Image (spheres, rainbow, N blue to C red):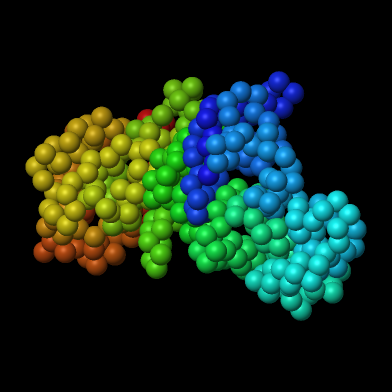
Amino acid sequence: MFTLDRAAVSYNSTPVLKSISFDVRKGEFVGIIGPNGSGKSTLLKAMAGVLSPASGGVMLDGRAVSQIPGRELARRLAVVPQDNPITFDYTVLEIVLMGRSPHLGRFQVESGSDFDIAQDALRRTNLLSFADRKIGELSGGERQRAMIARALAQETDILFLDEPTAHLDINYQVEILHLARRENLETGKTVVAVLHDLNLASEFCDRLVMLCDGRVFADGTPEDVITAENVREVYGTSVWVRRHPTSGRPYVLSLGSRAVASRLAETREQGQRLKVHVICGGGSGGGLFTTLLEMGCDVTAGVINIGDTDQEAAEALGIEYVEDAPFSPISEPAEKANAQFIAAADAVLVADVPFGSGNLANLRGAVRAMNIGKRVGLMGAVESYEERDFADGELVSALRSLIERGAEVLKTADELRDWVAKTRGL
């Protein structure tokens, strides 16, 4: 239906959209995502014909949108804006009837069929009981439903939503997007929505277009677009990306912040980066990674099995690590690669992780670190070692030996920070 061909849009000679190209097919539910200032709302306005491209084209069924007369375009395309433009205290029914304007003549008044269409739009948005209420008496979520009802009354085959869930509680956010999704599935309406919440975008949209600095950074299914690498690159923040247990769609969990990146840049300039290698697994490393990064350390990790949550955390934070096959003992090549990381590090930190025959090679790595003069820290209380020993006592024996030779036991985050500070000072 829509084709954008190298479309560029500027405000007062300032480029906002830069050579945007993609298609929207009939019946799709497309989410436009990206950080503030990336051009999401500007893109929607260009597609709606509100803004004309400075170069390139925005086409609807082969015709330039900017050349389609307004009344004709309004019969094809309904827009629910980000901000509610209604300032007069109309009733909800009067608001919804405004959606019939493109279908009326210049001096024509609404007919019985127009009222029937408005009533149906109210029913579909669960607002029939609000028909005689003043728009100013409604909550934010109810007002947004009224705006969607007005758009439905336009009887278009395309619906644009510009941040429809902004400033709404989670119950209204879900309700609004359920409404849009139902129209998409039941009537075949093409929906294009600008969304801030990545999890809602992933859950409701068939396809996502991620913008960055006025350009298309990624375009595809939620699984293709919402990745830890893409979010880190575009939003400047580190996240975990998991699969929703019921829908299977990706969802995002926060991990770290812009503060991590700024601290890394700061310490890089100051030349004070302490290299810490983390021995972890089973989710024991994620919190340590973030803490060490925020302290300005250069972090590596290993050996981590593919699919381990620590692998996800390392990927999300851009940490180099040694990987090995899932559900398998550590291989000889992986152990050698881990030894190289340890040799390059200033210190080694052993996470509070259980050890058994499969990952004892990691423990040997800690012993090797001590043998070549590296500082070694052990997370967790001494009394918990036996509970984590699934190697017939080898863990307890090795850890006690490390402690006798100077490895420090670190029980809290504060103790970890003190250990890093002392190590950096040596």
For the point 55% across and 36% down, the residue is 62
Quadrant of the image containing the C terminus = top left
- In terms of depth relative to the viewer, which is nearer, 132 or 116? 116
For the point 29% across and 64% down, the residue is 384
Q: Seen in the image, is 243 located left or right of residue 133?
A: left
Work out whether 62 lies above or below 360. above
- In terms of depth relative to the viewer, which is nearer, 188 or 147? 188
Asked if residue 134 shows in the view, the reply is yes
For the point 17% across and 49% down, the residue is 325
Q: Residue 411: percent from the left, percent from the top? A: 39, 56
Work out whether 269 lies above or below 295. above
For the point 67% across and 70% down, the residue is 125
The image quadrant of residue 308 is: bottom left
Q: Residue 158: percent from the left, percent from the top? A: 60, 52
Q: Residue 67: percent from the left, percent from the top? A: 68, 33
The image quadrant of residue 20 is: top right
Q: How many marks?
A: 0
- In terms of depth relative to the viewer, which is nearer, 220 or 167? 220
Asked if residue 42 shows in the view, the reply is no
The image quadrant of residue 49 is: top right
| Residue farthest to the bottom, as pictured | 129
Q: Residue 10: percent from the left, percent from the top? A: 67, 26
Q: Seen in the image, is 269 located left or right of residue 337?
A: right
